[in-house]
Amino acid sequence: MNHLPLIIKREYLTKVKNKSFVIMTFLSPIIFIALMLVVAYLTQLNNDKVRVISVLDESGLVQDIFKSTEKTSYNILEDMSLDDAKLLAKETESFGLLHISKISDLKTASDYITFYSEESPSINLISSLETKIQLELTNQNRITQGFDVEKLKASNISVSILQESFEGEKTSKADSIVKLVFGGAAGYLLFMFIIIYGNMIMRSVIEEKTSRIIEVIISSVKPIQLMLGKIIGTSLAGITQFVIWVILGGILLVVASLILGIDVSQMQTPQQELVRQAMENPNLKFDIQNVLVAFSHLPLVNLIFAFILFFIGGYLLYSSLYAAIGAAVDNETDTQQFMLPILMPLILSVYIGFFTVIENPHGTVSTIFSFVPFTSPVVMLMRIPFGVPLWQQIVSLVLLLGTFILTVWFAAKIYRVGILMYGKKPSYKELIKWIKY
């Protein structure tokens, strides 16, 4: 008799009715949103604070370029020594003092400019000051050499290369960014899902093994059915939890933002700020229309089906390994020696995805690892937005499913022996013997 549906139902209900599962399902998004709101609130407080910067320009070349904004106020100092300027900056609680001494040679202007402060200034602040000063001194140098600065500005040519396939399909720079976002999100989501819920399956097997319940169950159920039932049941519980997190988290974020009046979009890291500044560069700027056009160019139907199939295949492949490890050991401490061989392909696939696929999605490295079953779920998902022939996707999926069947067969053999083994820490040599039984 096929007991697989009963085992799946038992595993699913056992998980979703567990008190800790229910508590964490509803408590996790609350904690996560609370942390986000706290960080956003603190960031908002930090952004609302006006930063005062004193400027002592002994050269007289750049003091006129510093215009106060909502977030930054410039206090121009004149007719005083550097020591007096430092003392005044401290007394007025200025964030820092920008000192430009008399510049004898514009080409070596960096040797004459210093920023003094009690705290270490941010990269964004220093970069902003450098950009202002560099632009002004460049214009001053051009004037000194007899150039007409206004004519030079008028002579600047902005170039934006149009992109089009040989078949006549128009694309833009926005296409690459949209494809990167979709591919990266799909690959990273699979990576995190495997890590989180693979460990849940492993812990579930260890718990049943140590409680000796498994001895009763195994007497009437085939080990491979028990293992597959545990994998599928736990996976369905994980999907249920994930869907609740997304829905509840979205609702809480919107409600909390409206009630507390906190703008979560202000929560930016230095890296995000640098990206924002880069996007404001005229050479990199693209508007919402380009983004919408790029979105329409995505193979959405292909992406959806490929995501579902590769997501399921990759998750089942790694889940069977997690279940086998759980059956082979008596406690979580002993799992560490077996975790590295599982995590390495996953970590490798993420690195290949973000550092190779993005640069050359159809290169040799990207293509090869999109066929390797242990890396293909992540790498292929990140390649598909850039356009992958259907035959490559089918071959990759067939190899993935074939490897899953083979892995389940090996894992079931380990599961069959290991589930009844107690008090002995297994080695790789013993696992190989169990497979031969």
Image: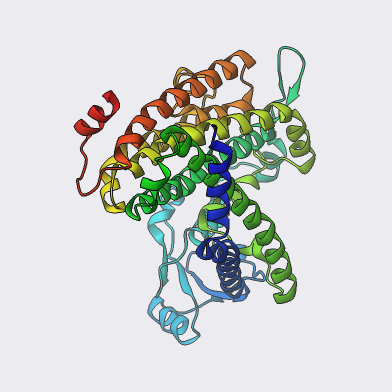
| Residue shown at the point (32%, 33%) measured from the top left | 414
| Residue shown at the point (43%, 54%) measured from the top left | 109
Q: Of residues 403 and 394, which is closer to you in this image?
A: 403
Q: In this view, does 98 lie to the left or right of 70?
A: left
**Residue 343 placement (x, y as % from top left):** 37, 39
Q: Residue furthest right?
A: 289
- Which colour assignment does the render follow? rainbow
Is 277 above or below relative to 163?
below
**Residue 415 placement (x, y as % from top left):** 35, 36
Q: Of residues 333 and 413, which is closer to you in this image?
A: 413
Image quadrant containing the C terminus: top left
**Residue 44 placement (x, y as % from top left):** 62, 71
Q: In this rendering, does residue 75 appear at all?
A: no
Is 309 above or below relative to 71?
above
Q: Is residue 112 left or right of residue 39?
A: left
**Residue 230 placement (x, y as % from top left):** 49, 43
| Residue shown at the point (52%, 45%) measured from the top left | 193
> Tag count in the figure?
0
Q: In this rendering, does residue 254 appear at all?
A: yes
Is 161 above or below relative to 98?
above
Is 209 above or below relative to 125?
above
Image quadrant containing the N terminus: top right
Q: Of residues 77 and 24, which is closer to you in this image?
A: 24
Q: Residue furthest bottom?
A: 91
User: Where on the picture, by quarter, is residue 411?
Assistant: top left
